[in-house]
Amino acid sequence: MVKLFIDPGHGGSDPGAVANGLQEKNLTLSIAIALRDYLTSHYQDISIRMSRTSDQSIALSERTRMANQWGADFYLSIHINAGGGVGFESYIWNRQFTNKSRTQQLRSTIHQAIIRQTDWRDRGQKEANFHVLRETTMPAILTENGFIDHQEEARSMRKSNWIDQVAEAHAIGIAEAFHLKTNTAPPTQNGQTLYRVVAGSFIHERNAREQINALQNKGYDSYVLPYREQNQTYFRVVAGAFNQRSNAENRLKALKNDGFDGFIVVV
């Protein structure tokens, strides 16, 4: 069993990078939840915990404490870049440490898979003295997924499938790095079926964020997934993605019992 700790960067009073009407904290959370759902739906023998599953402030020291206390096998910190560049880069700690060779190996596999899956410009495999890389006792990497202040990349971040593409790219890299076995699933022309439970679709993103807060108060993790139809962008609130339709139907039933309308989208 691989124990993966996913850390969506920033959150709460710390929005991270802000540009082009986007906030880093929202994008990182959406990627992290989509990644968690993809991994648990598609692969066996993986256990996942997250530093946050909603828009909340969590100190860096608390994030690493949670991962260390749990005994995670791998720590992944997800970020969006800023500063006028373009493309993807990843980081490990820039000092000598016990498991550096293993960390380099895992990072290289994941980094290369993300570049291969996204076709982003490769800005390199780098090192830095970031807290989450320094204070974790397990191999840890930090990914910077595009530039929020680059107009074209920000435009991509608003597209309906961008979150899923980034999450899937990370998942494929993690699966390759840890040799995860895939789950069996009903075949489709794209390989596998995923049943996504949508608990609301909104024209304004702020309304989708309010729905996420309401779902969180009832114990449901969710994320925003933009969806474009007839020249209009809608912000869907995804409250689960499942490999089996029966599991999606059970989630939809539970949501309705708690007062949330929803529907299932087959991917």
Image (cartoon, rainbow, N blue to C red):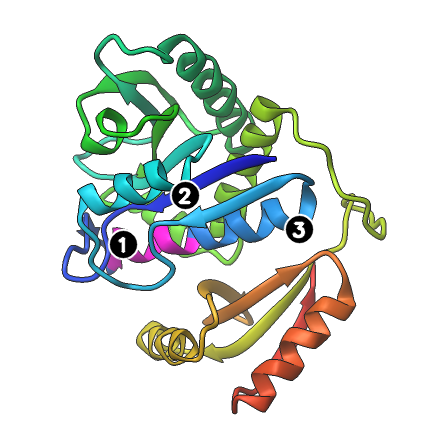
Q: Using the image, determine if residue 83 lies above or below residue 245.
A: above
Q: Residues within 10 Å of mark 3 (few under 14, many from 20)?
A: many
Residue visible at 58% across and 65% down in the picture: 240
Residue visible at 34% across and 25% down in the picture: 90
Q: Using the image, determine if residue 72 lies above or below residue 258.
A: above
Q: Position of residue 45 (x, y in %)?
A: 66, 39
Q: Mark 1, mark 3: which one is toward the viewer?
A: 3
Dominant secondary structure (helix, strand or loop) of the stretch shown in magenta: helix
Q: Using the image, determine if residue 249 lies above or below residue 104.
A: below
20 vs 203, left or right, is left
184 vs 169, left or right, is right
Residue visible at 19% across and 28% down in the picture: 130
Q: In the rendered structure, which segment of residues is drawn in magenta?
A: 22-30
Q: Using the image, determine if residue 194 lies above or below residue 38.
A: below
Q: Position of residue 23 (x, y in %)?
A: 25, 56
Closest to the observer: 91 or 225?
91
For the C terminus, the image quarter is bottom right
Which badge, 1 or 2, comes first in the chain's sequence?
2
Q: Which disc is residue 41 wearing?
A: 3
User: From mark 2 to mark 3, how far is it between C-alphas?
Assistant: 16 Å
User: From mark 1 to mark 2, how far is it between C-alphas?
Assistant: 14 Å
**Element type at mark 3:** helix
Q: Which disc is residue 92 wearing?
A: none
Q: Amino acid at mark 3?
A: Ser
Q: Amino acid at mark 1?
A: Lys
Q: Which disc is residue 6 wearing?
A: 2
Q: Quadrant of residue 251?
A: bottom right
Q: Which disc is residue 25 wearing?
A: 1
Q: Decide if residue 232 is in sight here.
A: no
Residue visible at 33% across and 79% down in the picture: 210
